[in-house]
Image (cartoon, grey):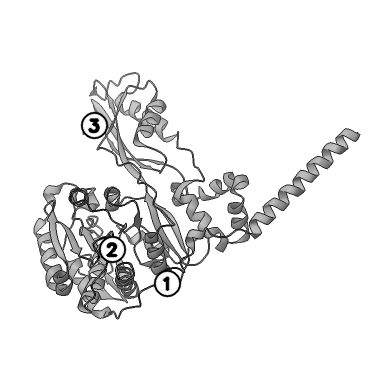
Protein backbone atom coordinates (compact mmCIF):
# COMPACT_ATOMS: atom_id res chain seq x y z
CA UNK A 1 0.00 0.00 0.00
CA UNK A 2 2.82 2.38 0.90
CA UNK A 3 4.43 1.69 -2.44
CA UNK A 4 1.18 2.41 -4.27
CA UNK A 5 0.82 5.62 -2.30
CA UNK A 6 4.33 6.68 -3.31
CA UNK A 7 3.56 5.88 -6.96
CA UNK A 8 0.34 7.89 -6.69
CA UNK A 9 2.17 10.84 -5.17
CA UNK A 10 4.81 10.61 -7.88
CA UNK A 11 2.23 10.58 -10.63
CA UNK A 12 0.38 13.45 -9.00
CA UNK A 13 3.58 15.46 -8.83
CA UNK A 14 4.32 14.73 -12.48
CA UNK A 15 0.85 15.87 -13.48
CA UNK A 16 1.21 19.08 -11.47
CA UNK A 17 4.60 19.73 -13.07
CA UNK A 18 3.21 19.05 -16.55
CA UNK A 19 0.30 21.44 -15.98
CA UNK A 20 2.71 24.09 -14.71
CA UNK A 21 4.97 23.73 -17.73
CA UNK A 22 2.02 23.96 -20.12
CA UNK A 23 0.65 27.03 -18.30
CA UNK A 24 3.98 28.87 -18.26
CA UNK A 25 4.72 28.14 -21.92
CA UNK A 26 1.22 29.31 -22.88
CA UNK A 27 1.48 32.50 -20.84
CA UNK A 28 4.88 33.43 -22.27
CA UNK A 29 4.22 32.33 -25.86
CA UNK A 30 4.91 35.03 -28.44
CA UNK A 31 5.04 35.18 -32.21
CA UNK A 32 8.50 34.50 -33.67
CA UNK A 33 10.94 37.40 -33.65
CA UNK A 34 10.81 37.40 -37.47
CA UNK A 35 7.41 39.07 -37.22
CA UNK A 36 9.03 42.21 -35.72
CA UNK A 37 8.95 44.58 -38.68
CA UNK A 38 9.53 47.86 -36.91
CA UNK A 39 13.03 48.23 -38.32
CA UNK A 40 11.74 48.87 -41.85
CA UNK A 41 11.32 52.52 -42.84
CA UNK A 42 8.37 52.52 -45.21
CA UNK A 43 7.96 54.79 -48.20
CA UNK A 44 4.90 57.04 -47.95
CA UNK A 45 1.60 56.40 -49.69
CA UNK A 46 1.15 57.58 -53.26
CA UNK A 47 -1.83 59.28 -54.85
CA UNK A 48 -3.84 56.72 -56.82
CA UNK A 49 -6.35 57.64 -59.53
CA UNK A 50 -8.81 54.85 -58.79
CA UNK A 51 -11.08 55.58 -61.76
CA UNK A 52 -8.17 55.53 -64.21
CA UNK A 53 -6.77 52.31 -62.74
CA UNK A 54 -10.20 50.68 -62.96
CA UNK A 55 -10.54 51.70 -66.62
CA UNK A 56 -7.13 50.24 -67.37
CA UNK A 57 -7.95 46.92 -65.73
CA UNK A 58 -11.22 46.88 -67.66
CA UNK A 59 -9.34 47.33 -70.92
CA UNK A 60 -6.83 44.59 -70.06
CA UNK A 61 -9.63 42.11 -69.28
CA UNK A 62 -11.15 42.73 -72.71
CA UNK A 63 -7.95 41.49 -74.34
CA UNK A 64 -8.58 37.74 -74.30
CA UNK A 65 -5.20 36.19 -73.54
CA UNK A 66 -6.76 32.81 -72.79
CA UNK A 67 -4.37 29.89 -72.32
CA UNK A 68 -5.85 26.64 -73.57
CA UNK A 69 -4.35 23.27 -72.77
CA UNK A 70 -3.95 22.74 -76.48
CA UNK A 71 -1.64 25.59 -77.49
CA UNK A 72 -2.99 25.45 -81.03
CA UNK A 73 -6.20 27.01 -79.68
CA UNK A 74 -4.42 30.09 -78.29
CA UNK A 75 -5.00 33.35 -80.14
CA UNK A 76 -1.47 34.75 -79.95
CA UNK A 77 -2.58 38.01 -81.58
CA UNK A 78 -4.28 38.79 -78.27
CA UNK A 79 -0.90 38.69 -76.51
CA UNK A 80 0.48 41.07 -79.12
CA UNK A 81 -2.47 43.39 -78.42
CA UNK A 82 -1.77 43.25 -74.68
CA UNK A 83 1.90 44.11 -75.20
CA UNK A 84 1.03 47.09 -77.38
CA UNK A 85 -1.59 48.17 -74.86
CA UNK A 86 0.92 48.06 -71.99
CA UNK A 87 3.35 50.25 -73.93
CA UNK A 88 0.67 52.78 -74.85
CA UNK A 89 -0.94 52.87 -71.40
CA UNK A 90 2.21 53.16 -69.29
CA UNK A 91 4.59 55.38 -71.29
CA UNK A 92 6.58 56.72 -68.32
CA UNK A 93 7.24 53.25 -66.95
CA UNK A 94 8.29 52.01 -70.39
CA UNK A 95 10.58 55.01 -70.87
CA UNK A 96 12.24 54.23 -67.54
CA UNK A 97 12.67 50.49 -68.11
CA UNK A 98 14.38 48.30 -70.66
CA UNK A 99 12.23 45.55 -72.21
CA UNK A 100 13.09 42.05 -73.41
CA UNK A 101 10.83 39.38 -74.90
CA UNK A 102 11.69 35.69 -74.44
CA UNK A 103 9.91 32.52 -75.51
CA UNK A 104 7.74 34.46 -77.91
CA UNK A 105 5.61 36.50 -75.50
CA UNK A 106 7.12 36.49 -72.00
CA UNK A 107 8.19 39.98 -70.92
CA UNK A 108 11.20 41.00 -68.84
CA UNK A 109 11.52 44.63 -67.79
CA UNK A 110 14.58 46.14 -66.12
CA UNK A 111 14.47 49.46 -64.24
CA UNK A 112 18.17 50.02 -63.65
CA UNK A 113 19.21 51.16 -60.22
CA UNK A 114 21.82 53.80 -59.52
CA UNK A 115 23.83 51.41 -57.33
CA UNK A 116 24.81 48.30 -59.33
CA UNK A 117 26.27 46.70 -56.19
CA UNK A 118 22.74 46.13 -54.84
CA UNK A 119 20.96 42.93 -55.83
CA UNK A 120 17.76 43.61 -57.81
CA UNK A 121 14.24 42.73 -56.79
CA UNK A 122 11.99 40.75 -59.15
CA UNK A 123 8.23 41.31 -59.26
CA UNK A 124 6.06 38.88 -61.22
CA UNK A 125 2.55 38.83 -62.71
CA UNK A 126 1.43 36.68 -65.63
CA UNK A 127 -0.49 37.76 -68.71
CA UNK A 128 -2.67 34.74 -69.45
CA UNK A 129 -6.01 33.70 -67.99
CA UNK A 130 -7.94 30.44 -67.82
CA UNK A 131 -10.91 29.82 -70.12
CA UNK A 132 -14.47 30.35 -68.99
CA UNK A 133 -16.14 26.97 -68.50
CA UNK A 134 -18.40 26.38 -71.52
CA UNK A 135 -22.05 26.70 -70.64
CA UNK A 136 -21.47 28.94 -67.59
CA UNK A 137 -21.37 32.27 -69.42
CA UNK A 138 -24.97 33.05 -68.45
CA UNK A 139 -24.10 32.56 -64.77
CA UNK A 140 -21.88 35.63 -64.77
CA UNK A 141 -23.41 38.85 -63.44
CA UNK A 142 -21.40 40.70 -66.08
CA UNK A 143 -19.89 39.29 -69.30
CA UNK A 144 -16.67 37.42 -68.47
CA UNK A 145 -14.59 39.40 -70.98
CA UNK A 146 -16.56 42.64 -70.82
CA UNK A 147 -14.39 44.24 -68.16
CA UNK A 148 -17.44 46.02 -66.82
CA UNK A 149 -17.02 48.44 -63.91
CA UNK A 150 -20.08 47.94 -61.72
CA UNK A 151 -21.11 47.44 -58.11
CA UNK A 152 -17.82 48.84 -56.85
CA UNK A 153 -15.65 46.38 -58.77
CA UNK A 154 -14.09 45.51 -62.13
CA UNK A 155 -15.58 42.26 -63.47
CA UNK A 156 -14.18 39.63 -65.76
CA UNK A 157 -11.81 36.74 -66.26
CA UNK A 158 -8.38 37.72 -64.99
CA UNK A 159 -9.58 40.58 -62.78
CA UNK A 160 -7.84 38.80 -59.92
CA UNK A 161 -5.74 36.08 -61.58
CA UNK A 162 -3.57 37.70 -62.68
CA UNK A 163 -4.25 40.83 -64.71
CA UNK A 164 -5.23 42.52 -61.48
CA UNK A 165 -1.62 42.14 -60.35
CA UNK A 166 -0.14 42.96 -63.77
CA UNK A 167 -2.13 46.17 -64.20
CA UNK A 168 -1.69 47.43 -60.63
CA UNK A 169 2.04 46.65 -60.73
CA UNK A 170 2.37 48.85 -63.82
CA UNK A 171 0.09 51.48 -62.27
CA UNK A 172 2.47 51.70 -59.31
CA UNK A 173 5.55 51.84 -61.55
CA UNK A 174 3.94 54.52 -63.74
CA UNK A 175 3.17 56.72 -60.72
CA UNK A 176 6.76 56.52 -59.52
CA UNK A 177 8.23 57.04 -62.98
CA UNK A 178 6.10 60.16 -63.52
CA UNK A 179 7.42 61.51 -60.22
CA UNK A 180 10.95 61.11 -61.53
CA UNK A 181 11.77 58.31 -59.09
CA UNK A 182 15.13 56.68 -59.76
CA UNK A 183 15.69 53.44 -57.84
CA UNK A 184 19.01 52.76 -56.12
CA UNK A 185 18.30 49.03 -56.39
CA UNK A 186 17.38 47.64 -59.81
CA UNK A 187 13.73 46.62 -60.18
CA UNK A 188 12.78 43.84 -62.60
CA UNK A 189 9.31 42.84 -63.75
CA UNK A 190 8.80 39.35 -65.19
CA UNK A 191 5.49 38.56 -66.89
CA UNK A 192 5.04 35.16 -68.47
CA UNK A 193 2.45 34.42 -71.12
CA UNK A 194 1.60 30.80 -70.22
CA UNK A 195 1.50 30.37 -66.45
CA UNK A 196 -1.95 28.80 -66.49
CA UNK A 197 -0.70 25.79 -68.46
CA UNK A 198 2.61 25.34 -66.62
CA UNK A 199 4.28 26.65 -69.71
CA UNK A 200 7.81 27.61 -70.67
CA UNK A 201 7.73 31.40 -70.33
CA UNK A 202 8.90 31.67 -66.73
CA UNK A 203 11.52 28.99 -67.32
CA UNK A 204 12.84 30.98 -70.26
CA UNK A 205 12.92 34.14 -68.16
CA UNK A 206 14.85 32.33 -65.43
CA UNK A 207 17.33 30.99 -67.99
CA UNK A 208 17.79 34.49 -69.45
CA UNK A 209 18.48 35.93 -66.00
CA UNK A 210 20.87 33.14 -65.03
CA UNK A 211 22.79 33.59 -68.27
CA UNK A 212 23.32 37.23 -67.32
CA UNK A 213 24.45 36.30 -63.82
CA UNK A 214 21.51 38.01 -62.14
CA UNK A 215 21.07 37.15 -58.48
CA UNK A 216 18.07 38.88 -56.90
CA UNK A 217 17.48 40.00 -53.34
CA UNK A 218 14.01 38.46 -53.58
CA UNK A 219 11.31 37.40 -56.03
CA UNK A 220 7.63 38.20 -55.42
CA UNK A 221 4.76 36.55 -57.29
CA UNK A 222 1.09 35.79 -56.71
CA UNK A 223 0.09 33.07 -54.26
CA UNK A 224 -1.52 34.20 -51.01
CA UNK A 225 -3.40 37.26 -49.81
CA UNK A 226 -4.89 39.10 -46.86
CA UNK A 227 -7.67 36.90 -45.49
CA UNK A 228 -10.24 39.02 -43.65
CA UNK A 229 -11.80 36.14 -41.70
CA UNK A 230 -8.80 34.00 -40.90
CA UNK A 231 -10.11 30.99 -38.93
CA UNK A 232 -7.26 31.12 -36.40
CA UNK A 233 -7.49 34.77 -35.35
CA UNK A 234 -11.04 35.53 -36.46
CA UNK A 235 -9.79 38.71 -38.14
CA UNK A 236 -7.60 39.81 -41.04
CA UNK A 237 -4.19 38.23 -41.58
CA UNK A 238 -1.70 38.89 -44.37
CA UNK A 239 -0.39 35.49 -45.45
CA UNK A 240 2.81 35.51 -47.49
CA UNK A 241 3.79 32.24 -49.09
CA UNK A 242 7.36 31.22 -48.32
CA UNK A 243 7.13 27.98 -50.28
CA UNK A 244 4.85 26.14 -52.65
CA UNK A 245 4.08 22.53 -53.13
CA UNK A 246 5.48 20.45 -55.92
CA UNK A 247 3.24 19.28 -58.74
CA UNK A 248 3.07 15.96 -60.50
CA UNK A 249 0.44 13.88 -62.27
CA UNK A 250 0.83 10.11 -62.11
CA UNK A 251 -0.49 8.11 -65.05
CA UNK A 252 -1.79 4.66 -64.07
CA UNK A 253 -2.40 2.30 -66.99
CA UNK A 254 -3.94 -1.17 -66.87
CA UNK A 255 -3.47 -3.10 -70.10
CA UNK A 256 -5.86 -5.92 -71.08
CA UNK A 257 -6.81 -8.06 -74.09
CA UNK A 258 -10.01 -6.12 -74.71
CA UNK A 259 -12.90 -7.71 -76.52
CA UNK A 260 -16.68 -7.77 -76.41
CA UNK A 261 -18.45 -6.85 -73.17
CA UNK A 262 -20.76 -9.85 -73.56
CA UNK A 263 -17.89 -12.14 -72.58
CA UNK A 264 -15.86 -10.35 -69.88
CA UNK A 265 -12.83 -12.06 -68.34
CA UNK A 266 -13.05 -13.54 -64.86
CA UNK A 267 -10.95 -10.74 -63.36
CA UNK A 268 -13.26 -8.07 -64.79
CA UNK A 269 -10.72 -6.71 -67.26
CA UNK A 270 -8.60 -3.58 -67.34
CA UNK A 271 -11.18 -1.24 -65.79
CA UNK A 272 -11.48 -3.39 -62.67
CA UNK A 273 -7.70 -3.68 -62.37
CA UNK A 274 -7.38 0.07 -62.76
CA UNK A 275 -10.04 0.70 -60.12
CA UNK A 276 -8.21 -1.53 -57.67
CA UNK A 277 -4.91 0.28 -58.34
CA UNK A 278 -6.36 3.77 -57.95
CA UNK A 279 -8.16 2.74 -54.76
CA UNK A 280 -5.00 1.19 -53.35
CA UNK A 281 -3.03 4.38 -53.98
CA UNK A 282 -5.72 6.70 -52.61
CA UNK A 283 -6.18 4.62 -49.46
CA UNK A 284 -2.55 5.08 -48.44
CA UNK A 285 -2.31 8.85 -47.87
CA UNK A 286 0.83 10.63 -46.82
CA UNK A 287 1.10 11.22 -43.09
CA UNK A 288 0.30 14.71 -41.84
CA UNK A 289 3.03 16.46 -39.88
CA UNK A 290 3.10 19.58 -37.75
CA UNK A 291 6.15 20.87 -39.61
CA UNK A 292 7.21 23.16 -42.43
CA UNK A 293 5.47 26.36 -43.62
CA UNK A 294 2.03 25.15 -42.52
CA UNK A 295 3.24 24.79 -38.95
CA UNK A 296 5.11 28.11 -39.19
CA UNK A 297 1.85 29.85 -40.09
CA UNK A 298 0.06 28.39 -37.06
CA UNK A 299 2.99 29.26 -34.81
CA UNK A 300 2.97 32.87 -36.02
CA UNK A 301 -0.78 33.34 -35.63
CA UNK A 302 -1.47 31.31 -32.47
CA UNK A 303 -0.55 34.17 -30.08
CA UNK A 304 -3.42 36.16 -31.62
CA UNK A 305 -5.84 33.23 -31.42
CA UNK A 306 -8.11 31.92 -28.65
CA UNK A 307 -6.65 30.27 -25.56
CA UNK A 308 -7.01 26.62 -26.74
CA UNK A 309 -5.04 27.36 -29.91
CA UNK A 310 -2.37 29.32 -28.03
CA UNK A 311 -1.99 26.52 -25.50
CA UNK A 312 -1.81 23.78 -28.13
CA UNK A 313 0.73 25.53 -30.36
CA UNK A 314 2.83 26.82 -27.44
CA UNK A 315 3.10 23.22 -26.33
CA UNK A 316 3.26 21.49 -29.71
CA UNK A 317 5.72 18.98 -28.23
CA UNK A 318 2.69 17.65 -26.35
CA UNK A 319 -0.31 18.57 -28.48
CA UNK A 320 0.93 18.17 -32.07
CA UNK A 321 -1.34 15.13 -32.70
CA UNK A 322 -4.34 17.21 -31.62
CA UNK A 323 -3.24 20.16 -33.77
CA UNK A 324 -2.91 17.91 -36.81
CA UNK A 325 -6.33 16.38 -36.16
CA UNK A 326 -7.96 19.79 -35.93
CA UNK A 327 -6.21 21.07 -39.06
CA UNK A 328 -7.30 17.97 -40.96
CA UNK A 329 -10.96 18.76 -40.26
CA UNK A 330 -11.03 20.69 -43.56
CA UNK A 331 -9.44 19.73 -46.89
CA UNK A 332 -7.67 23.09 -47.07
CA UNK A 333 -6.24 22.64 -43.58
CA UNK A 334 -5.10 19.10 -44.27
CA UNK A 335 -3.40 20.19 -47.49
CA UNK A 336 -1.05 22.41 -45.49
CA UNK A 337 0.41 19.46 -43.61
CA UNK A 338 1.04 16.72 -46.15
CA UNK A 339 1.34 15.66 -49.78
CA UNK A 340 -2.13 15.27 -51.27
CA UNK A 341 -3.39 12.57 -53.64
CA UNK A 342 -6.24 13.45 -56.02
CA UNK A 343 -7.45 11.06 -58.76
CA UNK A 344 -8.82 13.43 -61.39
CA UNK A 345 -9.21 11.78 -64.81
CA UNK A 346 -10.24 8.37 -66.19
CA UNK A 347 -10.20 6.84 -69.66
CA UNK A 348 -11.51 3.45 -70.69
CA UNK A 349 -13.35 2.18 -73.69
CA UNK A 350 -14.80 4.57 -76.27
CA UNK A 351 -17.97 2.45 -76.40
CA UNK A 352 -20.17 0.96 -73.69
CA UNK A 353 -20.12 -2.60 -75.07
CA UNK A 354 -16.37 -2.82 -75.73
CA UNK A 355 -13.78 -3.96 -73.20
CA UNK A 356 -10.83 -1.54 -73.38
CA UNK A 357 -7.36 -2.75 -74.27
CA UNK A 358 -6.03 -0.22 -71.84
CA UNK A 359 -7.69 1.73 -69.05
CA UNK A 360 -5.95 4.80 -67.68
CA UNK A 361 -6.28 7.06 -64.66
CA UNK A 362 -4.48 10.28 -63.84
CA UNK A 363 -3.70 11.10 -60.20
CA UNK A 364 -2.63 14.63 -59.34
CA UNK A 365 -0.18 15.08 -56.48
CA UNK A 366 0.68 18.31 -54.68
CA UNK A 367 3.98 17.44 -53.07
CA UNK A 368 4.71 18.99 -49.68
CA UNK A 369 8.13 20.39 -48.76
CA UNK A 370 10.14 17.51 -47.33
CA UNK A 371 8.72 15.00 -49.83
CA UNK A 372 9.93 14.34 -53.37
CA UNK A 373 8.50 13.02 -56.62
CA UNK A 374 10.75 9.95 -56.26
CA UNK A 375 9.19 9.25 -52.88
CA UNK A 376 5.72 9.68 -54.34
CA UNK A 377 6.45 7.17 -57.09
CA UNK A 378 7.91 4.67 -54.62
CA UNK A 379 4.86 4.94 -52.39
CA UNK A 380 2.49 4.46 -55.33
CA UNK A 381 4.39 1.38 -56.52
CA UNK A 382 4.30 -0.12 -53.04
CA UNK A 383 0.54 0.55 -52.83
CA UNK A 384 -0.34 -1.24 -56.09
CA UNK A 385 1.91 -4.18 -55.26
CA UNK A 386 1.68 -6.90 -57.89
CA UNK A 387 -1.36 -5.46 -59.70
CA UNK A 388 -0.59 -5.48 -63.46
CA UNK A 389 -0.45 -1.72 -64.00
CA UNK A 390 2.15 0.69 -65.39
CA UNK A 391 3.00 3.83 -63.40
CA UNK A 392 4.56 6.78 -65.22
CA UNK A 393 4.62 10.55 -64.82
CA UNK A 394 2.38 12.31 -67.34
CA UNK A 395 4.98 15.10 -67.42
CA UNK A 396 8.22 15.65 -65.55
CA UNK A 397 7.02 16.67 -62.08
CA UNK A 398 7.95 19.91 -60.35
CA UNK A 399 9.57 19.35 -56.98
CA UNK A 400 8.46 21.38 -53.94
CA UNK A 401 10.11 24.77 -53.81
CA UNK A 402 12.76 25.63 -51.22
CA UNK A 403 11.44 27.37 -48.10
CA UNK A 404 12.31 31.07 -48.08
CA UNK A 405 13.57 33.03 -45.10
CA UNK A 406 11.36 34.86 -42.61
CA UNK A 407 14.30 36.77 -41.16
CA UNK A 408 15.77 38.31 -44.33
CA UNK A 409 15.50 41.97 -45.25
CA UNK A 410 13.36 41.00 -48.23
CA UNK A 411 10.82 39.22 -46.04
CA UNK A 412 10.71 42.06 -43.54
CA UNK A 413 10.19 44.65 -46.27
CA UNK A 414 7.37 42.79 -48.02
CA UNK A 415 5.74 41.93 -44.70
CA UNK A 416 6.04 45.49 -43.39
CA UNK A 417 4.37 47.00 -46.47
CA UNK A 418 1.66 44.31 -46.50
CA UNK A 419 0.96 44.62 -42.77
CA UNK A 420 0.81 48.41 -42.90
CA UNK A 421 -1.65 48.46 -45.79
CA UNK A 422 -3.85 45.67 -44.43
CA UNK A 423 -3.60 46.82 -40.80
CA UNK A 424 -3.21 43.16 -39.96
CA UNK A 425 -0.66 40.72 -38.56
CA UNK A 426 1.58 38.97 -41.07
CA UNK A 427 2.43 35.28 -41.19
CA UNK A 428 4.31 32.93 -43.51
CA UNK A 429 2.29 30.34 -45.37
CA UNK A 430 2.42 27.46 -47.83
CA UNK A 431 0.98 27.84 -51.33
CA UNK A 432 -0.76 24.59 -52.17
CA UNK A 433 -1.24 25.52 -55.83
CA UNK A 434 1.53 26.37 -58.30
CA UNK A 435 2.98 29.68 -59.53
CA UNK A 436 5.58 30.80 -62.04
CA UNK A 437 7.86 31.80 -59.18
CA UNK A 438 8.97 28.21 -58.64
CA UNK A 439 11.16 28.49 -61.71
CA UNK A 440 13.06 31.46 -60.30
CA UNK A 441 14.41 29.59 -57.28
CA UNK A 442 17.81 29.63 -59.00
CA UNK A 443 17.67 33.41 -59.36
CA UNK A 444 17.10 34.18 -55.67
CA UNK A 445 17.33 32.34 -52.40
CA UNK A 446 14.13 34.04 -51.26
CA UNK A 447 10.98 33.64 -53.34
CA UNK A 448 7.71 34.95 -51.88
CA UNK A 449 4.12 34.62 -53.01
CA UNK A 450 1.61 37.34 -52.10
CA UNK A 451 -1.10 39.25 -53.92
CA UNK A 452 -1.99 42.45 -52.05
CA UNK A 453 -5.78 41.95 -52.01
CA UNK A 454 -8.09 41.49 -49.04
CA UNK A 455 -10.49 38.57 -49.45
CA UNK A 456 -12.84 36.63 -47.26
CA UNK A 457 -12.48 32.88 -47.49
CA UNK A 458 -15.68 32.84 -49.55
CA UNK A 459 -14.22 35.35 -52.02
CA UNK A 460 -11.41 32.99 -52.98
CA UNK A 461 -13.85 30.63 -54.74
CA UNK A 462 -14.22 33.07 -57.65
CA UNK A 463 -10.60 32.57 -58.73
CA UNK A 464 -10.78 30.38 -61.86
CA UNK A 465 -14.53 30.36 -61.21
CA UNK A 466 -17.62 32.36 -62.07
CA UNK A 467 -18.02 36.10 -61.41
CA UNK A 468 -14.32 36.84 -60.93
CA UNK A 469 -13.95 40.49 -59.96
CA UNK A 470 -11.65 42.91 -58.16
CA UNK A 471 -13.16 45.49 -55.88
CA UNK A 472 -12.10 49.10 -56.37
CA UNK A 473 -10.82 49.14 -52.80
CA UNK A 474 -8.60 46.14 -53.55
CA UNK A 475 -7.53 47.74 -56.82
CA UNK A 476 -6.25 50.81 -54.99
CA UNK A 477 -4.65 48.70 -52.27
CA UNK A 478 -2.69 46.77 -54.91
CA UNK A 479 -1.41 49.93 -56.59
CA UNK A 480 -0.35 51.31 -53.21
CA UNK A 481 1.39 48.08 -52.31
CA UNK A 482 3.48 47.81 -55.47
CA UNK A 483 4.39 51.51 -55.53
CA UNK A 484 5.39 51.53 -51.86
CA UNK A 485 7.24 48.21 -52.10
CA UNK A 486 9.32 49.46 -55.04
CA UNK A 487 10.00 52.77 -53.31
CA UNK A 488 10.84 51.13 -49.99
CA UNK A 489 13.20 48.50 -51.36
CA UNK A 490 14.82 50.54 -54.09
CA UNK A 491 15.17 54.05 -52.67
Q: Where is residue 82 drawn, in percent x and y?
A: 14, 64
Residue at figure coordinates x 23%, y 23% from the top left: 260
**Seen in the image, is 88 located left or right of residue 178?**
left
* Left or right, 102 with reference to 139: left
Q: CA distance from mark 1 to mark 2?
A: 37 Å
Marking on residue 405: none
Image quadrant where one finds the C terminus: bottom left
Q: Earlier in the sequence, mark 1 or mark 2?
A: 2
| Residue 85, position as x, y percentages in the image | 13, 69
What crowding class fits label 2: few (fewer than 14 Cα within 10 Å), some (14-19), or many (20 or more)? Answer: few
Mark 1 vs mark 2: in front:
1
Residue 374 vertical position relative to residue 403 in the rendered view, above or below: above
Task: Reply above or below: 327 against 139.
Answer: above
Question: The residue tagged with tag 2: helix, strand or loop?
Answer: helix
Q: Residue furthest right?
A: 2
- What is the CA distance from the residue labelled 3 to the residue labelled 2? 33 Å
The residue closer to the viewer here, 265 or 275, is 275
Residue labelled with disc 2: 139
In the picture of the structure, the residue carrying the numbered disc 1 is 420
The location of residue 92, given as percent across then percent down, is: 16, 74
**Residue at the outermost top position:** 266
Q: Earlier in the sequence, mark 3 or mark 1?
A: 3
What residue is at 14 percent from the left and 64 percent from the top?
A: 98
Q: Provide the residue designation for mark 3.
A: 349
Q: Is residue 142 visible?
A: no
**Quadrant assignment, res 184:** bottom left
Amino acid sequence: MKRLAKIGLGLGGAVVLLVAVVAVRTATFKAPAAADLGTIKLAPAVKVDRASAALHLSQAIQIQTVSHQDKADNQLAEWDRLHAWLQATYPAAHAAMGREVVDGHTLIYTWKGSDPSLAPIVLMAHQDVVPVTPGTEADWKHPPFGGEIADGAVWGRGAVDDKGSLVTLFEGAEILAKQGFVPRRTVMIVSSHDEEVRGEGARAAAAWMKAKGIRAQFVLDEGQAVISDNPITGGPVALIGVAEKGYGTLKVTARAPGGHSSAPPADGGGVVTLAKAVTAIAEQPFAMRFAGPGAAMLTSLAPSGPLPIRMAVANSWLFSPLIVKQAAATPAGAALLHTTIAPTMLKGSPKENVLPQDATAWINYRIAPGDTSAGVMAKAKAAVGDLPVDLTWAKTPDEPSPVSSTTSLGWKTIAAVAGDLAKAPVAPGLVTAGTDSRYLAGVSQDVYRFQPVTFSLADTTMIHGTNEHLSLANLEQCVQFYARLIATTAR
